Image (tube, rainbow, N blue to C red):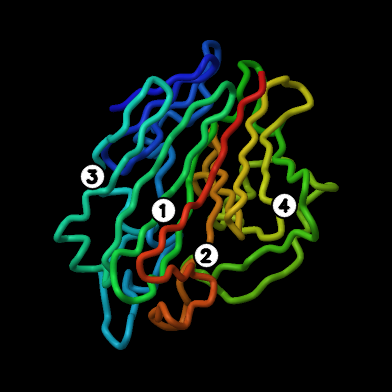
């Protein structure tokens, strides 16, 4: 476990999955604790896919690859900490033979964490080391404690999208795959979504046109969590299905889950990122606390 600190926040990062496992100030724990009886994770890194694939498989240039678990192999990989300082660390993925067996591209992947005052800056760095254009998705899955203050309830909080346009919902099938249909999201009051547990009875609520910023807040609490995701098109909201649990995940994704009626062909999935040979791309996520 690696610990980094700013003048305000402390963050713990696990070498397995490069997963953020703690985000706290001196007075408040902001990140879900990973209770194994409810949801044993905290903030998985999603790569090279966000969401599920039909039969845990995909096709590239006529060849079938898999099995690939939900959200890809990044959450289960081992990472080596590099350039460790008091307030930052870069976690580099160890690309094992098991990963190479199910992924057709030669690549490097690392996650940079930098704590600065009230903000944790996270940068996902993808490098294409091969000769072909690399096709991939990426996302984040941090779970945040709700309520943030003792004596308040989950329903006292809302998620606000302060810069949103006309927010759309991306529908999922009965097996939680991409239904390839968008509808206007009618759950907002202005740009606020009031939290209630049954929002997630059918799994994640996947939105687009959210303005790349989501804020967990309450009119009864001065504490807030602001998640800024400038490089991602979608924002999924989730907690454990059909359970009254004290957390909610804000999940910026660059792409949607796989197709419902066929094994996903990477070259036919328009929302995946394309990275040319020899190029490097960064994807950014900022988590800011207000107290």
Judge the density around disc 1: few (<14), some (14-19), many (≥20) Cα neighbours within 10 Å. Answer: many
Real-space CA distance between mark 1 and mark 4, rounded to the nearest whole angstrom: 21 Å
Q: Quadrant of residue 276?
A: bottom left
Q: Give the Cα distance between marks 2 and 3.
A: 24 Å
- Residue furthest to the top in view is 26
Q: Which of the two labelled residues, at mark 2 and mark 3, occupies the earlier sequence position? A: 3
The residue where tag 1 is placed is: 46
Residue sticking out furthest to the bottom:
62
Q: Earlier in the sequence, mark 4 or mark 2?
A: 4
Residue at the image position 34 percent from the left and 40 percent from the top: 18
Expressed as whole percent of the image width and height from the top left, the position of residue 136 reads 41, 66
Residue 255, numbered label: 2
Q: Residues within 10 Å of mark 3 (few under 14, many from 20)?
A: some
Residue 180 image point, x, y percent: 59, 76
Residue appearing at x 47%, y 52% in the figure:
282
Q: Which residue is mark 4?
A: 211
Badge 2: residue crowd in 10 Å (few <14, some 14–19, many ≥20): many
252 and 104: which one is in front?
104
Dot label at residue 78: 3
- For the residues labelled 1 and 3, the Cα–Cα distance comes to 14 Å
How far separated are the C-alphas under marks 4 and 3? 33 Å
Q: Earlier in the sequence, mark 1 or mark 4?
A: 1
Q: Is residue 96 left or right of residue 127?
A: left
Residue 239 vs 15, above or below: the answer is: below
């Amino acid at each position: 476990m690696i610990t980094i600190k700013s003048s305000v926040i402390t963050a713990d990062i696990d070498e397995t999955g490069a997963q953020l496992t703690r985000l706290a100030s001196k007075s408040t724990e902001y990140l879900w604790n990973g209770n194994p009886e409810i949801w044993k994770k905290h903030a998985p890194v999603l790569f090279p896919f966000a969401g599920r694939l039909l039969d845990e498989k995909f096709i590239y240039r006529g060849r079938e690859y898999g099995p690939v678990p939900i959200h890809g192999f990044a959450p289960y990989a081992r990472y080596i900490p590099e350039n460790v300082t008091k307030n930052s660390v870069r976690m580099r993925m160890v690309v094992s033979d098991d990963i190479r067996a199910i992924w057709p591209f030669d690549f490097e992947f690392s996650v940079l964490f930098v704590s600065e005052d009230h903000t944790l800056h996270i940068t996902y760095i993808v490098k294409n080391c091969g000769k072909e254009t690399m096709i991939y998705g990426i996302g984040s899955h941090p779970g945040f404690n709700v309520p943030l203050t003792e004596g308040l309830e989950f329903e006292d909080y809302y998620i606000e999208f302060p810069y949103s346009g006309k927010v759309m919902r991306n529908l999922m099938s009965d097996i939680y795959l991409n239904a390839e249909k968008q509808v206007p999201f009618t759950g907002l009051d202005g740009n606020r979504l009031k939290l209630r547990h049954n929002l997630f009875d059918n799994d994640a609520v996947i939105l687009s046109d959210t303005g790349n910023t989501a804020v967990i807040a309450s009119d009864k609490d001065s504490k807030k969590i602001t998640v800024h995701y400038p490089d991602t098109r979608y924002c999924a909201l989730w907690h454990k299905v059909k359970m009254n649990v004290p957390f909610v995940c804000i999940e910026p994704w660059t792409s949607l889950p796989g197709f419902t009626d066929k094994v996903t062909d990477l070259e036919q999935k328009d929302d995946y990122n394309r990275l040319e040979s020899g190029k490097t791309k960064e994807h950014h996520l900022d988590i800011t606390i207000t107290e």
